[in-house]
Image: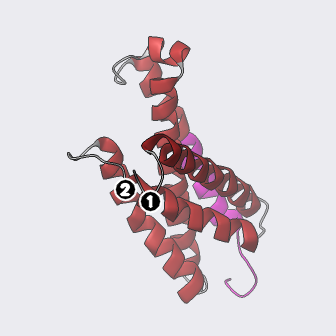
Amino acid sequence: MILGMSTEAFTRVHVIISLVGIASGLVVLFGWLAGKQLSFWTATFLITTVATSATGFLFPIHDVTPAIVVGSISLVPLAIAILALYVRHLAGAWRWIYLLTATIALYFNVFVLVVQLFLKVPSLHALAPKGSEPPFAVAQGIVFLLFTGAGAAAVKRFHPEGTH
């Protein structure tokens, strides 16, 4: 039992939170590319992405796993993004720091999604059963390049009022 739920039910809740974090993060990212600040979607993204990492620590795991490492690392850019947005209000360099760290946090969520897809989807698992084969590396490389490009473009395009 985890938080009064079976492990299976808790896993479903964790996955739903993760997917909401990814979906809302993509909405926010596309908003930045259009030069828009989407406050509701941003709050949804940040809350659910923190919740994704936090709930990951509640699973009954006794060793350090890649998921624990990624969840731990993800909390650092999330904390900085929250500080930049809600405390520093994107003033000066905090604008690009926010965009960079929030993009990194979203990337980590999508990175884990790709890992899970290769683990759980039979046709993808057959292509990379160990997670170290070229199809997995290519998929993760594409994701990395897309987020690198989108993050760089967001820094150029997203200038909310008062942060120029």
- The percent position of residue 72, horizontal first and vertical second, equals 34, 59
Whole-angstrom CA distance, mark 1 to mark 2, is 9 Å
Q: Check the image and report above or below for 161 versus 19.
A: below
Residue 78: image x %, image y %?
47, 67
**From which residue to which does the magenta span run?**
144-164
The residue to which callout 1 is attached is 3
In percent of width and height, residue 161 lies at 76, 83
Given residues 139 and 157, the one toward you in this image is 139
Q: Nearer the viewer, residue 57 or 77?
A: 57
Type of amino acid under label 1: Leu
Residue 71, located in which quarter of the rendered image? bottom left
* Left or right placement of residue 133 versus residue 123 in this view: left
Regarding residue 88, the answer to whether it shows in the image is no
Q: Is residue 83 above or below residue 32?
A: below
| Circle 2 residue | 58
Q: Tag 2, which secondary structure?
A: loop
Q: Nearer the viewer, residue 109 or 159?
A: 109
Q: Residues within 10 Å of mark 1 (few under 14, many from 20)?
A: few
Q: Does the magenta stretch include residue 89?
A: no
Q: Residue at x 69, y 56 (%)?
A: 24
In contact (CB < 8 Å): disc 1 and disc 2: yes
